[in-house]
Image (cartoon, grey):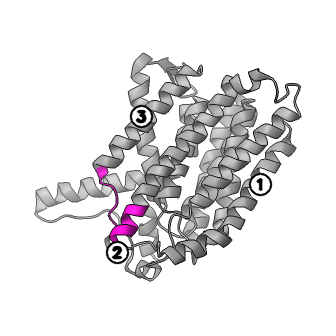
Amino acid sequence: MPFWIELIAGLLSFAIAAASGKMLIPFLHKLKFGQPIKVEFGPKWHEGKQGTPTMGGIMFILSSAVAVSVGYAVYRMTSSVTLGDESVFASKAALRLFSCIVFCILFGVMGFIDDFTKVARKKNDGLSPMQKIVIQIVIAAAWLFTMRYLGDTDTSIDLEFVSFDIGWFYYPLMIVVILYLTNAVNLTDGIDGLCGTVTMVNMLLYTVVFVLLSNAEMTLFTISIAGGCLGFLVWNFHPAKCFMGDTGSMFLGAAVTAAGLVTHRHLVLVLLALVYIIEALSVVIQVSYFKYTKKKYGEGRRIFKMTPIHHHFEMSGFSEYKIVITFSLFSLIVGIPGVLLVLFR
């Protein structure tokens, strides 16, 4: 795919996301769709963010969907195959691309329901954990089935230096991966600009990966989401004028997971998503250690000052700006070896 088409898609997504905030944020204020803040899930000084409009993820969900569609149309109009050719719309590569977009949107819809429930109840309790898990499993299973139907039948685990086929067990294992990563991205959305910036870096790295893999359709997917994240950051950098909410973080979680699984390069996926993996792992470690010490010593003890781990750094005196820069640079540094694995294989 010509680079200028990818550039148009990324810039278009950025422009739509940034411009839509001008209308969406006042609208959310008018509806009083403010984020309830629960101090046990973050530092006490986050109480000052109470009432900041949420559901801002609508900005980059809309921009990504539009940019992918426009970019793909331009790509086909400038290629040897015309839009009038029925095979264009029957193309399995194109259908896999749009199935990824639908997959992300469905996760975003689930997040929207969760956000709306929180706002309606005026507290930080939306869908129950079990409700979320059931919905996520259904969406994940449907997407994996769709991708297999569209020709993605590889059931191997590829760790670059070794690869092994696990057959049908691949699908339940990937459902677990989808659940872990989507919720890990959701946990990363804890301070202004963090999830958007880290995901922008992740999507730019995946754009390079898909260029190397000659997957033109998926480059549109990743560059459009990267552009949408950048447009949203206009409104989300500290002090945030709007939060993405679960609407946005669940959409981005699905995007990160979809990009990783489409490559079938599982070690690359781990490297590019390592920030999210560590964020979720810090919660698992903290909770497990607290329960263990409470049972053994009669009182729960903590390893980190607060989890997810970005709050530990915040409680240690890091500013929100410094955390965003540090985590984004870390994501870039550990992601580059993943790109190199693709380049030199």
Q: Which mark is residue 39?
A: 2
Point out the stretch of residues depicted in magenta. Answer: 116-129
* Image position of 330 (left or right of 11): left
Of the residues shown, which amino acid type is indicated by label 2? Val
Residue at 19% x, 64% y: name it. Answer: 300
Residue at 48% x, 50% y: name it. Answer: 109
Q: Which mark is residue 175?
A: 3
Q: Residue at label 1?
A: 12
Q: Quadrant of the N terminus?
A: top right
- Snapshot quadrant of residue 197: bottom right
Relative to the observer, which residue lies in front, 158 or 206?
A: 206
Residue at 63% x, 56% y: name it. Answer: 60
Of the residues shown, which amino acid type is indicated by label 1? Leu
Give the crowd class for mark 1: few <14, some 14-19, many >=20 residues within 10 Å: many
Residue 16 image offset from top left, x and y in percent: 72, 60
Of the residues shown, which amino acid type is indicated by label 3? Ile
Q: Secondary structure at mark 1?
A: helix
Q: Secondary structure at mark 2?
A: helix
Q: Is residue 311 above or below residue 109?
A: below
Q: Earlier in the sequence, mark 2 or mark 3?
A: 2
Task: Kindly report the distance in space between the C-alpha atoms of the residues bearing marks 3 and 1.
Answer: 32 Å
